[in-house]
Image (cartoon, rainbow, N blue to C red):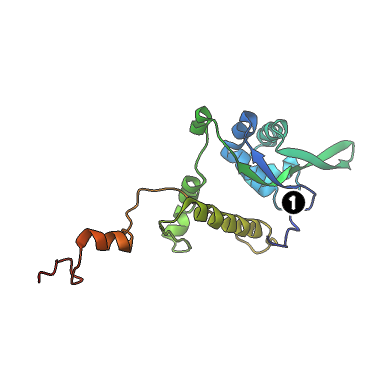
Amino acid sequence: MSSNLALPDYPLDDLRVVTARTELAALSHPLRDTLLDLLLERAATVGELATAVGRPPSTVAYHVHVLLDAGLLRVVRTRRVRAIEERFYGRTARIFYIGQVPVDALGRMTSPVADAAAESAPAHHADTLRAILRHARIPRERAAEFWDRVFELTREFSALPRGGETTYGFVAGLYPTTYPSLPDPADAADEVGGTDGSGTREVS
């Protein structure tokens, strides 16, 4: 696990497994997803979040309260400005991991890979996109082990010190496919008998 977990600037749990319908519903809106992402950097007020996303404070306040009600956000500190008490909101966990999703809730959730594909289109056209796609026929257990390593890399990316002028996106996915694969060598040898390497059987 990465040792660089200084961000954000408030205490929070490392991982929260999300399974409740209220939690899943709260995570299913793209603006709420953006707000949660912003709060990985530091705690922020509704006004700061509204400025960041270019939306009216009333709209952002509504979505913040949805996340509060779902237990995904909390007030981490307050500050009195003149006669008004400002609230700073933070996440309740560094990572919200989607657990078992009820079948009837799947239709309301978007795929992070699909979202990233749409978001990365301008970078693709500008030739500034770094991406790779590979396929491997491996046992389910090895896939789970590999995903754990990717998950740790995601933690590291999320905790990088903020700086520069560009916000980068990072997406990772691991999923079963119907992609073709070569047969096992032993199976291939049994299938063709003895061959000369060209796929034709030798006749003695």
Q: Residues within 10 Å of mark 1 (few under 14, many from 20)?
A: some
Q: Residue at x 46, y 46 (%)?
A: 114
x, y percent for residue 17: 65, 41
Q: Residue at x 31, y 62 (%)?
A: 186
Residue 123 visible somewhere in the drawing = yes
Which structural element holds mark 1? loop
Left or right: where 8 falls relative to 195: right
Q: Residue at x 70, y 47 (%)?
A: 39
Toward the viewer: 49 or 36? Answer: 36
Residue 188 position by quadrant: bottom left
Left or right: where 143 falls relative to 6: left
Toward the viewer: 18 or 38? Answer: 18
Task: Give the number of marks.
Answer: 1
Residue 170 visible somewhere in the drawing = no
In this view, 120 is above or below 75: below
Q: Residue at x 46, y 50 (%)?
A: 117
x, y percent for residue 48: 72, 45
In this view, 186 is above or below 118: below
In this view, 129 is above or below 80: below
| Image quadrant in which the C terminus is located | bottom left
x, y percent for residue 193: 20, 63
Residue beneath disc 1: 42
Toward the viewer: 135 or 9? Answer: 135
Toward the viewer: 41 or 191? Answer: 191
| Image quadrant in which the N terminus is located | bottom right
The amino acid marked with disc number 1 is Arg
